[in-house]
Image (cartoon, rainbow, N blue to C red):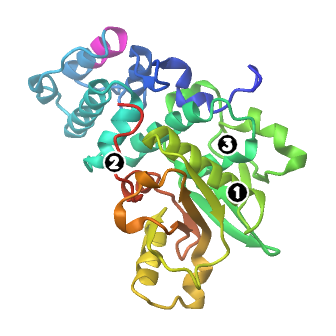
Amino acid sequence: MSETRDFWLSCGHHLLDRGEDGGLVVTDEFLKTYLARPEMTPPEDACTAERTLHRALLLGDPRQPVEAWQIAAIADADARENWELMISWRDHLVRHATLEAAYLGIVRNNLKFPYIFLDQLVQVILRNILNDCDDVFVLRAAELFFRTQILTSHEGSLVAADEETVPGSSAKPLSPLIAMLGLSSAAQVDVLGEANADMYWERSDSFDLALDLTGGRRGLAALGEVVTRWVRHMLAIDVELEPVTELRDAKLTWYVGLDAHATRIGDALWNGEKLDQTARGHVVGLYRLTFLEEEEIIENARGAPTYLIAAMSADMTLRLKPQNLITGLPVVHCAGALH
């Protein structure tokens, strides 16, 4: 990929180091982006204790120990809650050798952190995974791993647009880096295609290019490539994915729902239930996954493919859960490549 073709600048990947194994190593500069968030910046009427703590971490050492009494001394209850969460998040990140390992720890131990933190972590990990990727369809498909999509059926096509760019949707707070870059939270939405593909590089942080997810077209194939790269990087396992049209005659030896709605559909099929027309209409994508090394698979899943299902909600919202690929695949060991 050309050096000038960067993307997702706002995720902060430039602030991170990379270890010898290819994982992302947290830096002081990266930690300070959290302290610069609007939620963490003390307002004008903040107490001295909060201002002192914020100044010490943002202008000094962001890793310095923070004692319980320092947070308890903060007058505002909401601010105390924010600081407890922030320090817990910081401590979790610095406790691990890489951000990938920190993410695996959250998923496997079912740790509770805000979705916005997890989404940002997934984005910066994907930015690392896709560093050598020059296919903008794959990059746009990767956005489905960390940004909610609103789907629209138009002239026989199924198009996904970022929730925050759809008029009337409630946008999340902008990150400090997005604000620094002067990016808008809402912009004109165009469907990504060959004619405008080069525009992705300059618009990647605006998330204002929609993706065609119609069966048999490039969008679903690109999403399959993202899944393949994610599994290889996070679990050190090589797989191949093949989009399929339906599971009508397939025996579900093993399946992974890529979102909550897909999991319910998979459960129904597993139990021998017939999907009605409405449920079938909610399925966005189906994949047949094959492990390249069968000894990596648990005994009762060998000799048959694993199926992946993606589905939208009744209001045509799609929110993928990449953590399901970490916890749901039938693998013997899930130590991952990056500890």
Q: Secondary structure at mark 2?
A: loop
Q: Secondary structure at mark 3?
A: helix
Residue pictured at 56% horizontal, 73% vertical: 315
Name the foreground residue: 38 vs 226: 226
Q: Is residue 166 visible?
A: no
Q: Calculate the distance from the C-alpha at mark 2 to the C-alpha at mark 1.
A: 27 Å
Task: Name the residue that disc number 3 marks.
Answer: 139
Task: Determine contact: label 1, label 3, CB under 8 Å.
Answer: no
Q: Main secondary structure of the magenta part?
A: helix
Which amino acid, by three-letter code, is at mark 3? Leu
Name the foreground residue: 12 vs 220: 220
- The quarter of the picture where residue 184 lies is top right
Q: Bounds of the magenta span?
A: 54-60
Residue farthest along the top direction in this orientation: 60
Q: Viewed as shown, does residue 30 lie left or right of 66?
A: right
Q: Viewed as shown, does residue 87 lie left or right of 288?
A: left
